[in-house]
Structures are given as structure tokens and as C-alpha cells.
Image (cartoon, grey):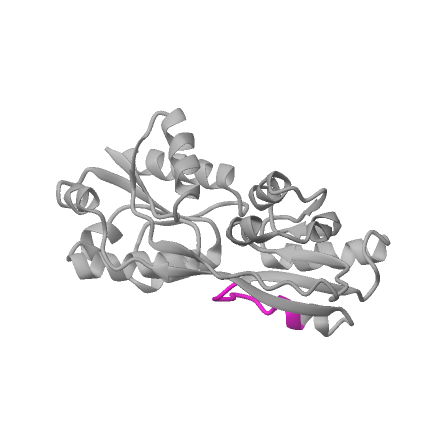
Amino acid sequence: MAILVTRPHPDNESTAAGLRARGHDVLLAPALKFEPIPFRHDSEAGYDGIMVTSANAIRSIAPQLQDRNLKKLPLFAVGEHTAASARAAGFAAVIVAGGDAAALRDKVRESARNKLLKKKGRLLYLAGADLSRDLAGELGAEGFEVVTQTAYRMAPVRHLPRDVCDGFAAHRIQAVLHYSRRSAQAFLEAARAEGVEITALAIPQCCLSEAVAGVLREAGASQVAVAAAPDENALFGTLERALRTRLA
């Protein structure tokens, strides 16, 4: 029996390693594919800080960082995983938020109040092509100047790997892990195209947030579990509880 991970590559590899360390077999079906977008930096822009909501943004711009002055700016990372990527890329001052976009917004506000960031300063927001929250608008309404630059896109994968389709057909998959609304939707569309949607939705769907869970519930999943916090350790805990409930 296996756990299916829909997280995009390469982050799915660390997830798989964590699950295997807990004694699970793992199948990988990345529902979205990472596509970097060339980074355009104006050295005269005069930013006071950087905001990042995904490690993918760091992954995209790291090879293009010719102006190392950016690395000296405070970088506000949505969570620890993104913060670790920023540190590895050479950013010196990394401030970590609580795991979602709202927490990142609040961390920027707090840093301005505590004078770690220039009050109502100019921020470079390295974003994905599909935004789930208008961070620039929310902070702009409070006087910050936010310059949004699209650093990457996540394209949906149209088909599931053959071993995953075979796993659903043989009822060898115990649960599915979902990390974002877009990846959950892309997974559903791929499962539908492969003719395994009903089987896929009949097992526990473990979701990083309530927003992700809503996609699965709307599709008809009856066993949807949500992590207590938007981080992977909490998601793993949710998975273990879902499996125990299913075996009870």
C-alpha cells in the first residue's frame, strides 16, 4: 500500500523521503510542472525588502542574481521551507512568516512597526503566475509600494504516471497528499482523463489547508482531512490520523 504525493518536483522528493522514514511506500504524481520566467531587475529600483510566497520563486531567480545587492535586503519568506531556499541562495536576512500569505502580510506589517523594515517602504514581490491572494493590494492599501514580478509559473500535468494509474486500479493507494488548490484541481482533471477519478476520490484526501480541501469536497471526496497548520509535519500528522481512522 502506498501514499500518493501530488506535490511538484523537486519538493516532492523531500516529501517522499519523509514518508518513507515513517514507514510508508510512496508514489509520485506531480500535478503541476515548474516553469521559470526570466528575472528582470532594475538596479536603480531602490527596494527596501523582498517578499516570497514559494521556494519556486527562489529556485527561478537564483541562477539569474547578478546584482548581489538584492541578497543584502531583508527577505520575507512565507514559511520555513521557502526561507531555507532563500538562505541557500545567499540571502543574508531572512524573516520567516507562519506558513501562508496572510501570515506573510502580517509579518511585513510587524517588521515595519518594529523598524526592521522601512515604514511604508518599497517591496519587490517575487510571485507565481497564479496568485491566490492580492498581497500587493492589501499592503498597498496600507501605504507600502509593492512591485510584483512574476518569477515562475506552474503548468498543470495532463496525465498521471502509469504506475499511479495501475495503483488506483489495483486499490494499492491508501491516501493522497495535496499541497495547493491548483495542484488539487490539476490532479482531479488528470485523474478524470485517466478514468480513475472515482477510485481516487474514494480514499482519504489529506490537505495542507481548508482552501485546498474545498476543491476535493466540491469534486465529491467524502474523506477529506485538513492539516492543523499549513506545514508538512502537520500534514503528516493528519495523514496518520486518517489512516488510523480508516483501519478502525
**Picture quadrant of residue 94:** top right
Q: Quadrant of the N terminus?
A: top left
Can you name the residue that lies furthest to the right here?
115
Is residue 233 placed above or below 103 in the rendered structure? above
Front residue of 144/238: it is 144
Query: Left or right of 126: which side holds 247?
Result: left
Query: Left or right of 107: which side holds 77?
Result: left
Tell me what residue is drawn at x 78 percent, y 72 percent.
Answer: 143
Q: How many marks?
A: 0
Q: Position of residue 46 (x, y in %)?
A: 77, 64
Is residue 151 placed above or below 73 in the rendered structure? below
Q: Position of residue 164 (x, y in %)?
A: 21, 44
Tell me what residue is drawn at x 63 percent, y 48 percent.
Answer: 98
Is residue 209 placed above or below 20 in the rendered structure? below
Q: Is residue 136 found inside the magenta-colored segment of the image?
A: yes
Tell me what residue is drawn at x 65 percent, y 57 percent.
Answer: 51
Q: Position of residue 182 (x, y in %)?
A: 40, 61
Residue 233 in sight in this render: yes
Front residue of 40/116: it is 40
Front residue of 38/108: it is 38
Magenta stretch: dominant SS?
Answer: loop
Q: Is residue 17 found inside the magenta-colored segment of the image?
A: no
Query: Left or right of 116: which side holds 246?
Result: left
Residue 22 in sight in this render: no
Q: Quadrant of the C terminus?
A: top left
Magenta highlight range = 128-137
Tell me what residue is drawn at x 57 percent, y 46 percent.
Answer: 82
Q: Position of residue 224 (x, y in %)?
A: 37, 51
**Picture quadrant of residue 181:** bottom left
